[in-house]
Image (cartoon, helix red, strand yellow):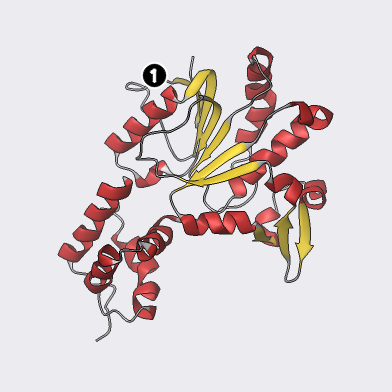
Amino acid sequence: MELNTQKVDPHDFMKLVNYMRDNYGINLEQKLTLVEGRLWNTIKKKGFNSLNEYFDFVVNDRTQKEARTLLTRLTTNYTYFMREDQHYSFLVNTALPSLLPVLSAKDLRIWSAGCSSGEEPYTTAMVLDDYFGASKHHWDRKVLATDISPQVLEMADEAVYPEERLKNLPSAWKTKYFNSEPGNQFRVKDSLKTEVIFRTFNLMDAFPFKKPFHVIFCRNVMIYFEKATRDALIERFYDALVPGGYLFIGLSETVDKQNSRFTFVRPSIYLKV
């Protein structure tokens, strides 16, 4: 029996929708086509005949390995270095000049939330390295990078990327921060890797951080969340920032200005006053 991806049983689909919402805050209710497209090959390779059979396997796998595979398949999007580069221009020209003079210690705390395969936090680390220049050794400027998927974090830690994902970087940065590998692949140099700390973290869980951040990037992540979940998360980001700290979200995302304590700076950039 071959699975017809155009006729997934609505009941089976809603079981998956409820599972993803309850466990990860991810709303797939309007994403039937995405689910069919991304899961069909996985279902077929594993020898299952339907979404229902595969889902039963996922929820009964005590190792949770298959749940991690499911999560990765449904949430990982294509990304690249220096994506939405106007955010980094703002970081360098506005955010850092306003934040650094008032820091009581040379401790700059930046969080890349939903970092996927690592391009965002590594880009941030490059921008910081270039910004601080010769004074960089006087600053603690490591970037915390978290994602819900251990599989994409393994890719981030491996830190090997195809050349096309580096196309927006200055050519000098490719030489400074990467080693060339066979097959037009590039590996992040250890000197930069040490500036990023990767951790598995579900944004639906309580924030465990002891100190507030100066900058939070959470870009193109909340598109998966329903409004109530998104609004609640934004308020938790507010509480996790220092006064004067910035939240960067995806260019296609918005913060509800009427119900948020954040001050609008420009599209996709918000300030905690």
Residue 201 lies in quadrant = top left
**Whether residue 35 is visible:** yes
Q: Residue furthest bottom?
A: 1
The image shows residue 15, relative to residue 3, as above or below, that is: above
Where in the figure is residue 146, as x and y percent of width and height?
A: 50, 44
**Quick check: 52 left or right of 220?**
left
Residue 258 lies in quadrant = top left
**Whether residue 26 is visible:** no
Front-most of 246 and 68? Answer: 68
Where in the figure is residue 186, as x and y percent of width and height?
A: 72, 60
Quadrant including the N terminus: bottom left
**Quick check: 166 left or right of 267?**
right
Report the residue at 61% width, 54% height from top: 157
**Quick check: 243 left or right of 55?**
right
Where disc 1 sits, the SS reads loop
Where in the figure is residue 69, as x and y percent of width and height?
A: 41, 64
The disc labelled 1 sits on which kind of residue? Arg
**Quick check: 12 left or right of 174?**
left
The image shows residue 211, relative to residue 43, as above or below, that is: above
Report the residue at 43% width, 21% height from top: 262
Q: Residue furthest left?
A: 11
Q: Residues within 10 Å of mark 1 (few under 14, many from 20)?
A: some
Where in the figure is residue 83, as x and y percent of width and height?
A: 60, 45
Report the residue at 72% width, 48% height from top: 169
The image shows residue 173, relative to residue 234, as above or below, that is: below
The image shows residue 154, relative to residue 223, as above or below, that is: below
- The residue to which callout 1 is attached is 261
